[in-house]
């Protein structure tokens, strides 16, 4: 993430399943709650919110069913 002048203020590395491996903050005021695929990182639970359900980055799976149900496939917890 950069500031308005293009200076780096935040940088993150992720695993293949979206778990944060490394986070670098250039300034203490930098806060970046968004993760891969525009997921919102919930500080309290450690889960990532994807508009309709939560994703557990350590397990690499969603923790609740796909709201579209079986129309999305027979594995309701598949990413």
Image (tube, helix red, strand yellow):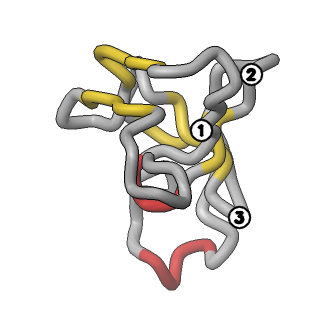
Residue located 81% across and 17% down the image = 44
Q: Nearer the viewer, mark 3 or mark 2?
A: 2
Secondary element type, mark 2: loop
Foreground pick, 74 / 2: 2
Q: Which mark is residue 43?
A: 2
Write down the residue under mark 3: 51
Q: Is there any visible trace of residue 79 in the rendered image?
A: no
Provide the residue designation for mark 1: 32
Residue 69 shown left or right of residue 61 in the figure? right
- Measured as percent of width and height from the top left, residue 59 is found at 40, 22
How far separated are the C-alphas under marks 2 and 1?
Answer: 11 Å
Please state the horizontal and vertical placement of residue 15, each as a whole percent of the image: 22, 28
Closer-to-camera residue (10/16)? 10
Nearest to the observer: residue 65 or residue 26: 26
Q: Residues within 10 Å of mark 1 (few under 14, many from 20)?
A: some
Do the residues bearing badges 3 and 2 touch, measured as CB atoms within 8 Å?
A: no
């Amino acid at each position: 993430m950069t500031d308005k002048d293009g200076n780096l203020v935040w940088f993150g590395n992720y695993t293949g399943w979206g778990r944060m491996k490394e986070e670098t903050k250039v300034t203490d005021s930098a806060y970046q709650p968004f993760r891969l695929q525009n997921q919102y990182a919930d500080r309290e639970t450690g889960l990532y919110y994807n508009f309709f359900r939560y994703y557990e980055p350590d397990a690499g799976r969603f923790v609740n069913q796909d709201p579209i149900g079986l129309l999305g496939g027979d594995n309701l917890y598949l990413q």
